[in-house]
Image: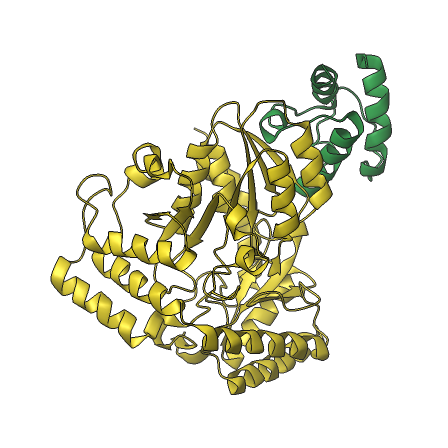
Chain colours: A yellow, B green
Amino acid sequence: MTDLFSKFDPLIEQRRALLAGGVEDPFNLVMERVVSPTVAVCNGRETILLGTYNYMGMTFDPDVIAAGKQALDDFGSGTTGSRVLNGTYRGHRECEDALKEFYGMDHAMVFSTGYQANLGIISTMAGKGDYIILDIDSHASIWDGCKLGDAEVVPFKHNDIEAMEKRLKRIPEGAGKLVILEGVYSMMGDIAPLKEMIRIAKENGAMVLVDEAHSMGFIGPNGRGVAEDQGCLDDVDFVIGTFSKSVGTVGGFCVSNHPKFEILRLVCRPYVFTASLPPSVVHTAATSIRKLMHGEAKRAHLWENSRTLHKGMRDLGFQLGTDEPQSAIIAVIMPDLERGAAMWEALLHEGLYVNLARPPATPAGMTLLRCSLCAEHTAEQVQTILGMFERAGKAVGII
Amino acid sequence: MDREATAAKIAELIEPFNKKGVDVTETTTFAGDLEWDSLTVMDFVAAIEDDFDIIISMNQQAEIETYGQLIDAVTKLQG
């Protein structure tokens, strides 16, 4: 018998070697108690959270929590059903209405996770004979959406406008085309030149999907994302987003102005063949989305945090993913996995949690310590974080 | 371009990517013999695509394991 697990042997060995060195397992951390959007107790230590994607700090918002509690009382703990059968409650509609208003778009469809939103929309929209043209650094859920569908998949070099255009022009006459881009790329925290890319996509007859998971609530005058910020949201055919970042709960969505959009509710398998979100989740999400519409002050503070941390890290001598802060993600580039894991552990002992990211999730085989800031991080916390990075970086020998 | 001319052109294009100086034959595999990672594959595919003005989709790439299969595919894709 061939052991089907043998394909994982290299990874098992890599993990064993890493943990044999005595470091805490970076992929097995338990949050024992969560104090606030920015502080938790992890492995018995009070820890500042700098790797949660909780950009707008909505997880402990009193209105959001009250809406969830009320929904538990009024609608029960779960729907036990698909959106197209018994799983559409008033809260799901309220959530979709809030999204339509938030983005100023005609249609909104709520999925059970952001992963499923990409999986569903991409695999359903691009079928046999169609072409998907996408950035090589796209999120796993985008790649999996491509894999689930039957379209021809054509990647281009990250953020390379010319490479995208060349490939678009080579696609056979008459074929359907879907260009897939992200507003913020979560590994390096860099943004896409959406305005120029979308213009070229449209000139070449393609429909455009933009994943704004890491920009919602924060980037753009109304927090609608990078496309809004660059003034090209009207040319985006599908915006994909998530409730698990700025919104502060779980779920995914697609918003669109396409007149035939509603048919997707019947043909999109990852929407149909799964249970809908629990009532408490959609009520917290709807409340949070409406509050995010008026998040100007929080947005301004989050930008300030991002600029302060970025500059502070550079001044300390760390190598960062972007020359300027472009989002609420600041990626600190580690020389290798071993020192990355050592640095991650040193930070945890200091009382700071960041994400350790490594290949294949990262571009170019890099090991990253990924920091995501929150609008609820105080200016003092950001200074404390810089002090922790300085001590850990010197102890591990990175700076 | 016929198969021979295509093969000659690809031999030229693969040169800068063949850092280990592997003796490339029709049966040489990209993942196994050349030990290319996904980024190298992408850059090499882009170089081929740009030179021949074709698209080799991921779906087609999945069918190409050896150097000989690549020459066949590129010959065919030029129509």
Q: Is residue A107 left or right of residue A174?
A: left
Q: Is residue A129 left or right of residue A279?
A: right
On screen, residue A145 above or below A216: above
Q: Looking at this view, is A335 or A226 the one in front?
A: A226
Q: Quadrant of the C terminus of chain B?
A: top right
On screen, residue A399 above or below A214: below
Residue A393 in the image, given as x and y percentages of width and height: 66, 76
On screen, residue A217 above or below A277: below
On screen, residue A393 above or below A326: below
Q: How many discs mark residues in the rendered view?
A: 0
Residue in view at x 39 percent, y 45 percent: A116
Q: Residue furthest bottom?
A: A380
Q: Quadrant of residue A20?
A: bottom right
Residue in view at x 74 percent, y 23 percent: B67
Res. A348 visible in picture: no
Q: Is residue A96 left or right of residue A395?
A: left
Q: Looking at this view, is A33 or A251 the one in front?
A: A251
Q: Quadrant of residue A117?
A: top left
Residue A318 in the image, given as x and y percentages of width and height: 70, 72
Q: Quadrant of residue A85?
A: top left
Residue A311 in the image, given as x and y percentages of width and height: 67, 77
Q: Looking at this view, is A256 or B54 the one in front?
A: A256
Q: Looking at this view, is B4 or A396 the one in front?
A: B4
Residue in view at x 71 percent, y 35 percent: A166
Q: Is residue A230 left or right of residue A8?
A: right
Res. A254 visible in picture: yes
Residue A82 in the image, given as x and y percentages of width and height: 23, 42
Q: Quadrant of the N terminus of chain B?
A: top right
